[in-house]
Image: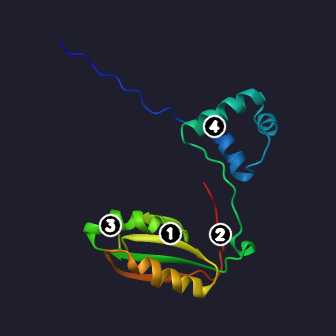
Amino acid sequence: MERAIVTSLPESLDNIDMSIIESLRQDGRMPFAQIAHNLNVSPGMIRVRYARLVARGFLKVVAITNPLSMGYDSMAMIGIRVEGSHLLEAADRISAFQEVVYLVITSGAYDLMIEVLCRDRSDLLRFLTEKLYTVEGIRASESFVHLKIVKEIYY
């Protein structure tokens, strides 16, 4: 006898969920009561929805710092070419470096793109020579030093 296996699809987000996320994206400290008032629902509903959004990984509230005010004067994007057999290991090793704040595996001219945050250009040079270039499998890299951040959005 055959039985059908029923799998549930991931729960989708409704308009209230999306509004909660957008409210917190604009101001991560917005009180639940204010969000509830804006949406014409109860604060309890917002608390329950918020907890569900966090538990299911749709939402994570974090502090966003200003690197310049914290003494970091040198940011760069670095495109990295890696030997194919070392790609995942190189990505894991590079992601562990404190200076790396963003890392993606990409297609195209570079295998990895990373963003690094350093105290100054000497610190950036030290990162490149003493850390990045010691990772096995790296064939080449190209650094793009940030001159000015024109737009920065977090989703």
Marks 4 and 3 close (CB-CB < 8 Å):
no
User: Of marks 2 and 4, which one's residue comes earlier in the chain?
Assistant: 4
The tally of labels here is 4
Looking at marks 3 and 2 on the same chain, the residue that comes earlier in the sequence is marked by: 3
Residue 25 percent coordinates (x, y): 68, 51
Give the answer, above or below, for where 123 lies relative to 152.
Answer: below
Contact? badges 1 and 4 (CB < 8 Å): no
Q: Identify the residue position indicated by label 1 in the image.
A: 97
| 9 relative position to 100: left or right | left
Q: For the residues labelled 3 and 1, say whether their Cβ atoms are less than 8 Å apart.
A: no
Mark 4 to mark 3 CA distance (whole Å):
37 Å
Which amino acid type corresponds to the residue marked 3 in the rendered image? Leu
Q: Which mark is residue 87?
A: 3
Q: Amino acid at mark 2?
A: Lys
Question: What residue does disc 4 label?
Answer: 17
Closer to the eye: label 1 or 4: 1
Numbered tag placed on residue 151 in the rendering: 2
Q: Which quadrant would residue 58 be assigned to in this image?
A: top right
Point out which mark residue 117 bears: none
Labels 3, 2: front one: 3
- In the rendered image, residue 155, in percent from the top left (x then y), is placed at 60, 54
Lower position in the chain sequence, tag 4 or tag 3? 4
